[in-house]
Image (cartoon, rainbow, N blue to C red):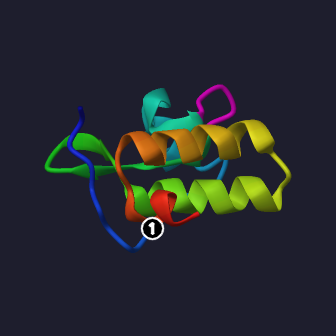
């Protein structure tokens, strides 16, 4: 299993349509075709899943009524044993 960041903060994510976001690899996003819902952070040159990123993606997807992305974020969080996933 991948090394997971059990972090609590999620920030400094480039806005949609920015050149920095376009430079990020597709596997960083839950919706890679539209480059939406990033959930990985770059740490020491490697992209690692972030529990805070998954929670942010889950909340945003629920707010936007995007059940498919919310389900994907929740299942990945359970797989990576994120603390917030077991509470709900």
Of the 4 image quadrants, the one containing the N terminus is top left
Residue 35, given in percent of the width and then of the height, sits at 62, 37
| Magenta stretch encompasses residue 4 | no
Q: Is residue 29 above or below residue 16?
A: above
For this orientation, the residue located farthest to the left is 44
Return the residue nearer the eye: 78 or 27.
78
Q: Is residue 1 above or below residue 54?
A: above
Bin the neighbour count of mark 1 within 10 Å (Cα to Cα): few under 14, some 14-19, many 20 and up: few
| Magenta stretch encompasses residue 33 | yes
Of the 4 image quadrants, the one containing the C terminus is bottom right
Return the residue nearer the eye: 35 or 53.
53
When asked about the image quadrant of residue 24, the answer is: top left
Is 24 left or right of 4, judged from the image as shown? right
Q: Residue at x 37, y 73 (%)?
A: 8
Q: Residue at x 57, y 62 (%)?
A: 56
- Name the chief secondary structure element in magenta: loop
Residue 3, given in percent of the width and then of the height, sits at 20, 43
For this orientation, the residue located farthest to the right is 65
Residue 37, given in percent of the width and then of the height, sits at 61, 47
Is 6 left or right of 26, judged from the image as shown? left
Tally of numbered tags? 1
Q: Residue at x 69, y 33 (%)?
A: 34
* Span highlighted in magenta in the image: 31-35
Q: Look at mark 1 in the image and give the residue it sits on.
A: 12
Return the residue nearer the eye: 63 or 23.
63
Q: Is residue 15 visible?
A: no
For this orientation, the residue located farthest to the bottom is 9
Q: Is residue 80 visible?
A: yes
Residue 20, given in percent of the width and then of the height, sits at 48, 48
Q: Residue at x 47, y 59 (%)?
A: 86
């Amino acid at each position: 299993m991948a090394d997971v960041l059990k972090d609590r903060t999620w920030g400094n994510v480039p806005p949609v349509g920015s050149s920095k976001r376009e430079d990020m690899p597709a596997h960083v996003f839950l919706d890679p075709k539209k480059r939406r819902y990033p959930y990985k952070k770059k740490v020491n040159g490697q992209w690692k899943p972030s529990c805070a990123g998954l929670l942010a993606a889950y909340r945003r997807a629920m707010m936007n009524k995007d059940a498919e992305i919310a389900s994907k974020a929740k299942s990945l969080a359970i797989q990576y044993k994120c603390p917030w996933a077991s509470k709900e």
